[in-house]
Amino acid sequence: MAKPATREFVLMAQQAGYQLIEIEQLRSNRWLLILADGAGERTGLLVQARPLVSSADVQDLADLVRLRQLHSGILLAHGGAFSPTAHRTHAELADQRLRLCTVLPPATKPEHDGTKSIRATLKSIP
């Protein structure tokens, strides 16, 4: 597997509909991207580019989401898979904000709730 470049992850995030807020290469095979979805919620994307992603990586993601006060977190196994212990740790954490993925899921689209604009208009009428 060829070593991925940072720009590859930026392009991947943009194609999935996210706005890039911040990117940092933590190690030669690990990146952290802070993304915003269509609703403006901040998501941490921890990318691991190696054959097997472990339970320690799942715990790292949980810590990042908690410490950076992110809405959610995605652990992306780029070119690899999750170990059974990684899946077990994810299940034990039972945190619905954390996702394990091998493909970046699309960003959440903003909800177009017409009642919000109607309510705002009604409030402004004297």
Image (cartoon, rainbow, N blue to C red):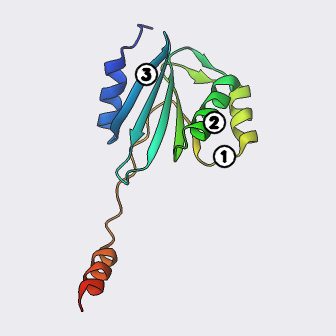
x 33%, y 78%: residue: 115
Location of residue 101 in the rendering, given as x and y in whole percent from the top left corner: 53, 34
Q: Which one is closest to the eye, mark 1 or mark 3?
A: 3
Are discs 2 and 1 less than 8 Å apart at CB? yes
Residue 62: image tag: 2
Q: CA–CA distance between discs 1 and 3?
A: 24 Å
Q: Amino acid at mark 2?
A: Ala
Q: Residue at label 3? A: 24
In-image side of 72 versus 60 (left or right): left
Q: Secondary structure at mark 2?
A: helix
Q: Secondary structure at mark 3?
A: strand
Location of residue 22 in the rendering, given as x and y in whole percent from the top left corner: 38, 30
> Tag 2: Cα neighbours inside 10 Å, few (<14), some, or many (≥20)?
many
Q: CA–CA distance between discs 3 and 2?
A: 17 Å
In the displayed structure, 97 sits above or below 77; it is below
x 54%, y 19%: residue: 80
In the displayed structure, 1 sits above or below 78; it is above
Location of residue 54 in the rendering, given as x and y in whole percent from the top left corner: 67, 22
Residue 2 versus residue 74: which sits nearer the camera?
74
Residue 83 in view (yes/no):
no
Residue 95: image tag: 1
The image quarter in which residue 123 lies? bottom left
Residue 62 versus residue 91: which sits nearer the camera?
62
The numbered mark, 3 or 2, whose residue comes first in the sequence reads 3
In-image side of 86 versus 122 (left or right): right
In-image side of 23 versus 80 (left or right): left
The numbered mark, 1 or 3, whose residue comes first in the sequence reads 3
> Tag 1: Cα neighbours inside 10 Å, few (<14), some, or many (≥20)?
few
Q: Amino acid at mark 3?
A: Glu
